[in-house]
Image (cartoon, rainbow, N blue to C red):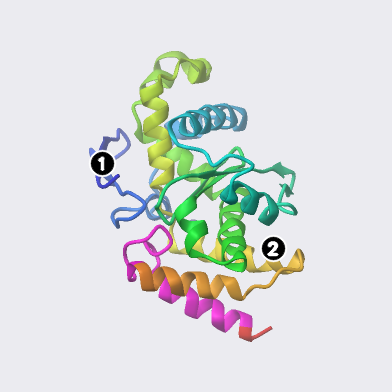
Amino acid sequence: MRYKKLSLVVGLSFLVLSGCKTSGMDLGGMMDAGMSLTTAATLTDSDIKAIGDKTIAQQDASNKIASAGSKHGKRLASLTADFKQVDGVSLDYKVYVDTDVNAFAVPNGSIRIMSGLLDNMNDDEVRYVLAHEIGHVVLGHSKKAFQVAYASSAARQVAASSGNAAVSALSNSQLGELGESLIGAQFSQKQEYEADDFAVDFLKSKGHKTDGAVTALRKLEKMYGNDSSFFASHPASGQRAARLEQKLAQR
Ligand SMILES: [Zn+2]
């Protein structure tokens, strides 16, 4: 996905929602700017969970999932063995067979990782990526991004017409649009740093090494430069690596 225009009723007539490998207006930044999201705010946690469940079911159905017995499936299972439940959230993981070096999380606790990322990173680096995504879920970033995506998508029209019961009325194309928005969601600089900090603390608490955080970001910087990967979009991955290096050295 590259640039995608979505109509938005709150304040702006259009926003550019960027794909995971492009830079553009970011959702977190818009929220930081204090944009009001009255429509999204009417969604309850259970609505978000229900829409999240549907969104991920549709993403799973439209992507090739690595089987549990495959090389990628086995590796993910072993890397997530002690990452099943965090802060009361049950997490569920799958590998999509896809050359993209990418991963994403849905606020219902579903985390998906592309086989391209597994193929390009060692175990410590993958654990960092997973821990970073877990951070976005438990810190509520994914929920916020989801609310923005929902508010700005066609799905909102359905909710407006029939209230929160509209979850069941979402069409496949509306769910697809929500899923795309989530996969392409960019977080603010503050949120990325928070998820990075969460990740290193989380890895330590589980007795895992934290150096993978820095080397993963350096790899992404090398692969994509500082402006074109899912991790590199905002802020640059080199900048994040340097920040984490400093943080880890102080401990
Ligand atoms: Zn992130």
Query: Which residue type does callout 2 highlight?
Result: Phe
Is residue 233 left or right of 45 when viewed as pictured? left
What type is the residue that disc 1 sits on? Lys
Q: Is residue 231 one of those drawn in magenta? A: yes
Q: Which of marks 2 and 1 is nearer the N terminus?
A: 1
Kind of element beneath mark 2: helix
Q: In the displayed structure, would residue 182 be above or below residue 126?
A: above
Which residue of the protein is positioned furthest toward the front in this rendering?
70
Neighbourhood count class around disc 2 (C-alpha, 10 Å): few under 14, some 14–19, many 20 upward: many
- The residue pinned by badge 1 equals 4
* Quadrant of the snapshot with the N terminus: top left
Look at the numbered disc 1 and give the secondary structure of its residue: strand
Identify which residue is drawn at 46% across, 34% down. Answer: 59
Q: Distance between the residues labelled 2 and 1?
A: 34 Å
* 57 sits left or right of 101 in the view: right
Residue at mark 2: 202
**Residue located 35% across and 53% down the image:** 26
Q: Which quadrant of the structure image shows residue 101?
A: bottom left
User: Per the image, is 33 magenta?
Assistant: no
The C terminus sits in image quarter = bottom right
Closer-to-camera residue (77/142):
77
Q: Where 228 sits versus 244, above or below?
A: above
> Where in the figure is residue 118, as x and y percent of width and height?
52, 57
Choose between 233 and 115: the one closer to the eye: 115
Q: Does the residue labelled 1 lie within 8 Å of ligand 1?
A: no
Residue 187: % across, % down = 44, 55
Q: Do the residues labelled 2 and 1 touch (CB within 8 Å)?
A: no
Specify few, some or many for label 1: CA neighbours under 10 Å numbering under 14, 14-19, or 20 or more.
some
Residue 77, horizontal then vertical, whole percent: 67, 49
Segment tinted magenta in the rendering: 224-248
- Rendering coords of residue 15 (x, y %): 27, 43
